Image: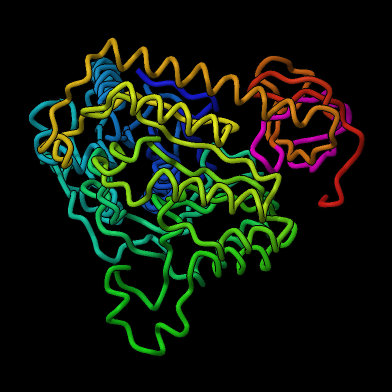
């Protein structure tokens, strides 16, 4: 069971601008985190050069790829259900090839071919450049697998194709992998060691997006605050770097500064941060630039020091409070969201109360809340018994969700009667007469369309709200237009 207050994309069908001369059709779906959606844009770019245009029609596809998530068992079960759908289509179109990409591919490797007879190729997150060779193998009648993790692949030399794009917002990947080794998390095993992308390639991508009319970017990484460029190499090897490399190294706060200065009219977001790695320099850089959004996603996972230690989280409850206090001191209006796991092995009612009290202290604007899901190969799976009954997990999760609803409404109400700058992203789901967009605090704002269009920055005065959405009336264009 899992709950989140904020809406997130799941299983989006991704659409690519058609390239003249391409005759083969690619259907690609992505599940899980934003990094997977960003990776699918890289895959589409690589395959566009191999003669593939994307299609929204599964039945027409020559190649079907699903970009997978392994963070929870539920995510993996969703993928297996989708493969059943692909199998039904493949009976009608036997020439169709099916591939599994991403974290689930890396975790299961060759086992996937044995378990899912429909699958023709299995490709890990660091092997997408090998897709042309792997597809050639499949077309020659052989199954193909490449799940080798890399110590230097960042795809910084690939210009992503903006999939399912509104032409307004885009992801820009800055790091890959993770070194933190939280005991519950499979990411270090599926995405490898942490490495950073050349900042020059990042700025070039940001400038290209600006020249094409994009209004907002999100800098992406498993842990963006660990970004560190010193000329290449893993972050863990930085101490071996030369004095010159160390003196000219680019940290995340410096990268933020470079991006904000390169495109002063473009909104900049970033995700995800880690409490142990977020520095005061990052917060000060946010305060320095008006175009860096006043929003931080800061996963805490638990409010109990005992459970945090068992999770191998490198921060305590008190250190997290100190970080929150510093954020609020330097950025008084900053919105903060969270990730929380309930039902971690050995979690007591007292531990659960610690989580609730932490939530009361911070009063998050929204969050992503889950019951613990044991993942094969993690330290928790190897060393700890999943000993919390499912009924208790669900009850604790519901208490967390209920409290978050209260806090979300509390935070959203603070915007009522205020003027907020909204970037129009799409038509409202509930009314064709209204636009939907977000303010800098990541709150969804809905208002009547009038003469405005997607991509406009609009000043909206808010009059009412739900726990997740602000409702108001436009009073004119923002100066950012």
Of residue 316 and residue 248, the one placed in the foreground of this image is 316
Q: Please tell me which residue lies in front, 209 or 274.
A: 274
Measured as percent of width and height from the top left, residue 43 is found at 38, 48
Q: Residue at x 71, y 39 (%)?
A: 439
Residue 55 figure quarter: top left
- The quarter of the displayed image where residue 373 is located: top left
Q: Is residue 330 magenta?
A: no
- In the picture, the quarter occupied by the N terminus is top left
Magenta stretch bounds: 439-461
Up-down: is 298 above or below 58?
A: below
In the picture as drawn, the residue positioned furthest to the front comes out as: 350
Q: How many marks?
A: 0
Q: Position of residue 202 (x, y in %)?
A: 51, 64
Q: Nearer the viewer, residue 433 or 375?
A: 375
Residue farthest toward the top in the current orientation of the protein: 391
Residue at image point 56% right, 49% down: 218
């Amino acid at each position: 069971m899992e709950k989140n207050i904020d809406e997130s994309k799941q299983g989006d069908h991704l659409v690519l601008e058609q390239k003249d001369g391409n005759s083969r059709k690619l259907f690609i779906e992505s599940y899980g985190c934003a990094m997977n959606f960003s990776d699918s844009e890289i895959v589409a770019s690589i395959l566009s050069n191999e003669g593939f245009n994307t299609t929204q029609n599964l039945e027409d596809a020559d190649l079907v790829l699903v970009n997978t998530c392994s963070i929870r068992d539920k995510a993996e079960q969703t993928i297996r259900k989708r493969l059943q759908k692909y199998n039904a289509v493949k009976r009608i179109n036997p020439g169709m090839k099916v591939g599994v990409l991403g974290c689930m591919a890396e975790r299961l490797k060759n086992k996937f071919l044995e378990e899912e007879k429909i699958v023709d190729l299995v490709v890990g997150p660091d092997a997408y450049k090998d897709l042309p060779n792997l597809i050639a193998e499949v077309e020659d009648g052989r199954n193909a697998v490449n799940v080798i993790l890399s110590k230097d692949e960042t795809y910084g030399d690939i210009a992503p194709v903006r999939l399912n794009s509104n032409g307004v917002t885009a992801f820009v990947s800055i790091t890959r992998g993770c070194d933190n080794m939280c005991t519950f998390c499979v990411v270090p095993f599926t995405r490898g060691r942490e490495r950073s992308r050349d900042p020059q390639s990042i700025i070039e991508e940001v400038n290209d997006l600006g020249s094409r009319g994009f209004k907002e970017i999100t800098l992406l990484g498993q842990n963006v605050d660990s970004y560190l460029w010193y000329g290449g190499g893993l972050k863990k090897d930085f101490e071996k770097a030369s004095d010159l490399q160390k003196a000219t190294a680019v940290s995340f706060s410096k990268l933020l500064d470079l991006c904000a200065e390169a495109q002063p009219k473009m909104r900049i977001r970033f995700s995800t941060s880690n409490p142990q790695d977020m520095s005061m320099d990052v917060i000060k850089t946010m305060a320095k630039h008006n175009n860096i959004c006043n929003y931080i996603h800061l996963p805490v996972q638990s409010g109990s020091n005992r459970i945090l230690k068992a999770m191998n989280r490198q921060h305590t409850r008190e250190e997290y409070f100190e970080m929150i206090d510093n954020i609020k001191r330097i950025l008084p209006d900053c919105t903060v969201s969270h990730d929380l796991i309930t039902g971690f092995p050995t979690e007591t009612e007292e531990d659960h109360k610690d989580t609730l009290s932490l939530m009361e202290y911070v009063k998050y604007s929204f969050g992503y809340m889950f019951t613990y899901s044991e993942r094969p190969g993690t330290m928790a799976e190897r060393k700890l018994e999943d000993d919390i009954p499912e009924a208790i997990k669900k009850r604790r999760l519901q208490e967390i969700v209920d409290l978050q609803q209260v806090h979300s409404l509390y935070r959203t109400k603070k915007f009522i009667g205020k003027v907020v700058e909204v970037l129009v992203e799409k038509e409202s789901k509930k009314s064709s007469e209204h636009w939907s967009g977000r303010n800098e605090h990541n709150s969804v704002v809905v208002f009547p369309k009038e003469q405005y269009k997607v991509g406009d920055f609009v000043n909206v005065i808010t009059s009412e709200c739900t726990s997740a959405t602000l409702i108001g009336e436009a009073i004119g264009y923002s100066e950012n237009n």
